[in-house]
Image (cartoon, helix red, strand yellow):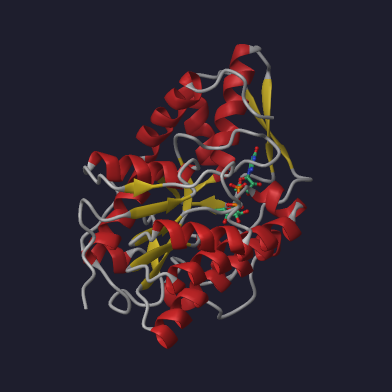
Amino acid sequence: MKEEMKYNSKVYIAGHKGLVGSAIKRNLEDKNYSNLIFSDIEEFDLQRQEQVENFFEKERPEYVFLAAAKVGGIGANNTFPAEFIYSNLSIEVNVVHAAYKYGVRKLLFLGSSCIYPKHAPQPMKEDSLLTSPLEPTNEAYAIAKIAGLKMCRYYNQQYGTNFISVMPTNLYGPKDNYNLETSHVLPALIRKFHEAKINNNPYVELWGTGSPKREFLYVADLAEAVVFLMERFDYPDIGEIINIGVGQDVTIKELAETIKEIIGYPGELKWDKSKPDGTPRKLLDISKITKLGWKPAISLKEGIKRTYRDFLTGPKVRKR
Ligand code: GFB
C-alpha cells in the first residue's frame, strides 16, 4: 500500500534545528508543506521515552523525519563514545517505537556512511553492511546507527510498518558546528582558514596526514534526496538501506587547498600527525538512488562558497 505524503500531511521533523533537520525543514517549506511540527529540547528530551510517547500521543504525526542525533567529527567521536552510543540509541529506540505505537504512516531514519566496514570495497555498496570490522574512532556512533536501521527493518518485518533508512555521506552546509574540538573537518577548516587570514597567521594546523579521502554532500542536496524518497518510495521497494552521496571524493589535503583558495588565505598548511586520520576512505556507491532518479546538484566548490557565506553572516560569537 503506497503512503503518499501530501502537502497538508502532518509531518514531524525530529532535530529541526540541526544541520540536517533545518535543511529538511527549508526544503519542505519551499515545497509548501503546510503542516510541519517540531519539538524543542526545551520542551522535551528525545532521550526520555515517556516524554517522546506523550508527544506522539498528543500530536499524532503522520510522517516522521528522524534527523535528531548526537553527531560530531573524529575528535568528538573518539573522545565521547559513551555519549554517542547512549544518546543515539535512546533517541532511535524512543522515536521508532513511538512511531510504531502511534501509527505513523512512514518514517525516514538518517544513518551515516560510517556504518560500513573500515576496509569495505570502494565505492561502498549497501550490501557491504556488517561484512567486516568498523573504523574504531567512530565505532560507538556506527553501532548506534546500525541498531537504528535494523530497528526500522525489524519493525517493518514484524509489525508491517513503513520505516525507511538512508545512509548519507559526510554532510556540510548552513547551521554546521564550528567548535574546533567537536566539529567535522569541513566547518573546522572554514573557521581555521578564516581566522588565520584575519589574524595574518603564517600557517594553519590541520589534523592527521591529509591523505584520507572523504566524500562531501551539501546538505540542501541531502534534503532534496530524503524528501524525494519520502514522497515516492516505500519499504521494501528501496531495500533495507539506501546510500546518498555525490559519487566522488577528495583527499583532506585537496579539500584544504580548495577551502584555502575560496577564503583567500595566503599562508602554509601544517599537519599534526598526532591526531587520528580515521578511516582511509569512505566513498559511497550511489547507483541505487541515481537509478531512482535523484542526483546531487551542488558542486563542492559552490557548496563551500555558500557555507562560507553562512559562516560570515552567522552568529558573531562562534562556539568553541
Ligand atoms: O570530518 P572528520 O572529523 O570525521 O575528519 P570522519 C575527516 C578527516 O579530516 C580526518 C581530518 O582524517 C581528520 O583527521 N582533519 C584535518 C580534521 N583537519 C581537521 C580538523 O581541523 N578537524 C577535523 N574534525 N578533522 C566522521 C565520524 O568521521 O564522519 C562520524 O567521526 C560521522 O561518526 C562523520 O560518521 C560522517 O569523516 O573521519
Residue shown at the point (37%, 57%) measured from the top left: 247
Q: Is residue 274 left or right of residue 298?
A: right
Q: Quadrant of residue 134?
A: bottom right
Residue 293, visible in the rendered structure: yes
* Relative height, residue 220 to residue 66 (above, below): above
**The one of 246 and 152 positioned closer to us in this rendering:** 152
Residue shown at the point (39%, 53%) measured from the top left: 12
Residue 159 position in % (x across, y down) = 41, 84
Q: Where's the C terminus, which quadrant?
A: top right
Residue 78 position in % (x across, y down) = 73, 54
* Relative height, residue 176 to residue 100 (above, below): above
Residue 298, visible in the rendered structure: no
* Relative height, residue 265 to residue 229 (above, below): above
Q: Where's the N terminus, which quadrant?
A: bottom left
Q: Residue furthest right?
A: 274
**The one of 318 and 190 positioned closer to us in this rendering:** 318
Residue shown at the point (35%, 33%) measured from the top left: 302
Residue shown at the point (60%, 33%) measured from the top left: 178
Residue 253 position in % (x across, y down) = 56, 40
Q: Is residue 207 left or right of residue 108?
A: right
Residue 265 position in % (x across, y down) = 55, 19
**The one of 270 and 144 positioned closer to us in this rendering:** 144
Q: Residue furthest front?
A: 58
Q: Residue furthest bottom?
A: 158
Q: How many circles with numbers are drawn on the protein?
A: 0
